Image (cartoon, grey):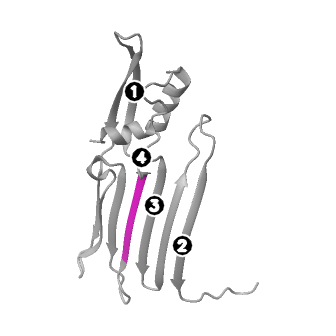
Amino acid sequence: ITRGEVVRGFLLLRVGDRCSELRRAESERILRAQPFLADVDIDVIGNSRGGVNLEVRTIDEASLILSGAIDNSAPHVRSVRVGSANLSGLGVSTSFSWRHQPAFHDRLELRASDYQFAGKPWVLSVASMRDPLGRDDRAEMTLPFRTDVQRVAWRAHLSETRGHAQFVERD
């Protein structure tokens, strides 16, 4: 179950703000766009102090990541992928995969994405892959453009790839 603080971090309304239909609808749309949430409803309910309360109901996506491949010849297990699309309800996706490569080293891959890094609506994604002919490491931090209410969006990307030289045939 996604934690309340994660859901609150995506809301465009805070306690004491003036509630508008635009910000309520955009908050609902932004939450629905998160890969770990299947459905979201935000209702505005009047309170006894003359203000309003927001009731936010979410339905989580299935979070278990599990796949693999087997064969009738040795080695029988050819690949495995395990992880979580919403680790402990934190809005963090993690996965580890392994694939057998005949005649080479096996392929290993580790991925993680935090969809609310440092309590902000920033997305931090890191990935590292080792395959038979090299390695690929990537890190990316973004503030995606999600709504017209938002003033800025940005992206920072860092990567390193090491592999064998490739030769291209001339036409």
Residue for badge 2: 159
Residue type pointed to by label 1: Asp
Marks 2 and 4 sit apart, C-alpha to C-alpha, by: 24 Å
Marks 4 and 3 sit apart, C-alpha to C-alpha, by: 14 Å
Judge the density around disc 1: few (<14), some (14-19), many (≥20) Cα neighbours within 10 Å.
Answer: some
Marks 2 and 3 sit apart, C-alpha to C-alpha, by: 11 Å
- For marks 3 and 1, the one nearer the N-term is 1
- For marks 1 and 2, the one nearer the N-term is 1
**What range of the chain is rendered magenta?**
108-115
Residue type pointed to by label 3: Ser
- For marks 2 and 3, the one nearer the N-term is 3
2 part of magenta stretch:
no
* Labelled disc at residue 41: 1
Judge the density around disc 3: few (<14), some (14-19), many (≥20) Cα neighbours within 10 Å.
Answer: many
**12 and 114: which one is in front?**
12
* Labelled disc at residue 35: 4
Looking at the image, residue 152 lies above or below residue 76: above
Residue type pointed to by label 4: Pro
Q: Residue at x 41, y 25 (%)?
A: 42
Q: Is mark 2 on a helix, strand or loop?
A: strand
- For marks 4 and 3, the one nearer the N-term is 4
* Labelled disc at residue 125: 3
Marks 1 and 4 sit apart, C-alpha to C-alpha, by: 16 Å
Q: Is residue 8 left or right of residue 160?
A: left
**Image x and y of residue 145, in percent:** 59, 45
Query: Which image quadrant: the N terminus?
Result: top left
